[in-house]
Amino acid sequence: MDNLIDILDLSVEEIDELVEKAKDIINNPDAYREKCRYKKLATLFFEPSTRTRLSFESAMLDLGGNVIGFSGADNSSAAKGESVSDTVRTVGCYADIIAMRHPKEGAPLVASMHAGIPVINAGDGGHNHPTQTLTDLLTINMEKGRFTDMTIGLCGDLKFGRTVHSLIEAMSRYSGIRFVFISPKELKLPSYVVDEYLTKNNIPFEETNDLMAAMPNLDILYMTRVQRERFFNEEDYIRLKDSYILTREKLAEAKADLTIMHPLPRVNEISVDVDDDERAAYFKQVRYGKFIRMALILKMLGIE
Amino acid sequence: MNIDGITNGLVIDHIEAGKGMELYNALHLGDLESSVALIKNVTSHKMGKKDIIKVDEVLDVDLDVLGFIDPNITVNIIKDNEIVGKKHIELPKKVTNLIKCKNPRCITSTEQELPHIFKLTDPATRTYRCIYCETKARETRV
């Protein structure tokens, strides 16, 4: 594999392979400590992102490699007007692999055409964020021990969340999956996602605006943030925002082995009193994110 | 209305009525030294009305441009007053710098030197998407 720009660049087999590799790293971390010795990862973050950048950098450091890069376009030559292609051509002379975040859609694809070294898309605007999807998949597999036969509830902003769309797309390739989409009608899943991934593959799903009613059937609850700026008027936002906040009370009817996920950062959509519940997996998810990125770096550098 | 036949050249036929001028511009026919006729609203059995372009010179037309504008167009090559060949037109898999991406969040909006490349993603609906941001081309006008 040369680059990872879109989760669709990976086949189901390749995803399974990455998940297995990540699990092996979790079980045998010492065996991987020197795997990337003398290799350099460049983290080119044209906009700030604490979590993703630190995850990539920790992943490389835990593989014994080194890290160079910048965080924020102000600290890079982009501030002087340099193009993405010139920046990555330069970085390609120093590093072995690039992880890139950019506010403009398609910037990592442009980078992959010019870098001469593998490029990983670490998020391009609201477009693609394949390592978040890989993180979600590893979390599901670690917490459930499988990818098949489960009911996945997705709650909150299902309209604009590309991460949600990618996860639906990735999970709809496995058997026995049912989806429950929980959102206000203003933030419903777009029809092209329904048509392209669900109807076409005969995947059962239901849509509701009632989180409490959906709760008892769920094996996974994937929460997202309902953002104020997505609403046309303040009144609707105030009316709806609390219906999509997960609290300990709302978990009363949930299964004992429910897995609660969230891509983070969270604002208030999961109340902090849920954090101690053993079903809360969103901080474990952060940890898994590092391991799947380790597996990805190894694969892209061609290291066993 | 009569336009003289051509001895050696091209007849671009079955152009959807009204699209002839667009095609004339897209193929840069205005730059040619030879005679070029753009005939509008010709009566057609199949189409009701159609446009035709005749070029008094055998030149290499960009079939991708033709296919993108309308894959039903036909191109006849004329030599010594006879049709000696027909070019097969199809939807191009990819078009470069023919249309521009209008998504303000696309990298092409800030990096001016990047080629605007659109990929055919659904031949049935003639859907083209920007290779960078995957935004649908809203129109197939060049």
Image (spheres, helix red, strand yellow):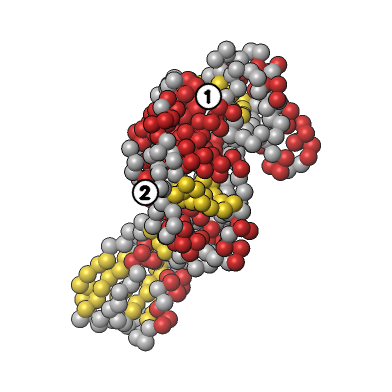
Residue A71 picture location, percent across and down = 59, 51
Residue A215 seen: yes
Sequence-wise, the earlier of marks 1 and 2 is: 2
- Is B135 rendered above or below residue B100? above
Left or right: where A76 falls relative to A296 = right
Say yes or no: labels 1 and 2 on the same chain: yes
Residue A193 picture location, percent across and down = 51, 38
Please say if the residues under marks 1 and 2 sit with CB atoms less than 8 Å apart: no
- Chain of the residue displaying label 1: A
Mark 2 crowdedness (10 Å alpha carbons): few <14, some 14-19, many ≥20: some
Residue A71, labelled with which disc?
none
Question: Residues under labels 1 and 2: Cα distance?
Answer: 32 Å
Nearest to the observer: residue A108 or residue B87: A108
Residue that badge 1 annotates: A152
Nearest to the observer: residue B37 or residue A26: A26
Q: Across the whole image, how many numbered discs are drawn on residues?
A: 2
Mark 1 crowdedness (10 Å alpha carbons): few <14, some 14-19, many ≥20: many
Label 2 amino acid? Asp
Residue that badge 2 annotates: A2
Mark 1, secondary structure of its residue:
strand
Residue at horizontal 57%, vertical 13%?
A255
Residue at horizontal 30%, vertical 74%?
B60
Residue A194 picture location, percent across and down = 51, 35
Q: Residue furthest right?
A: A235
Left or right: where A75 falls relative to B19 = right
Q: Quadrant where the N terminus of chain A lies?
A: top left
Residue at horizontal 33%, vertical 37%?
A304
Mark 2, secondary structure of its residue:
loop
Label 1 amino acid? Ile
Residue at horizontal 37%, vertical 87%?
B33
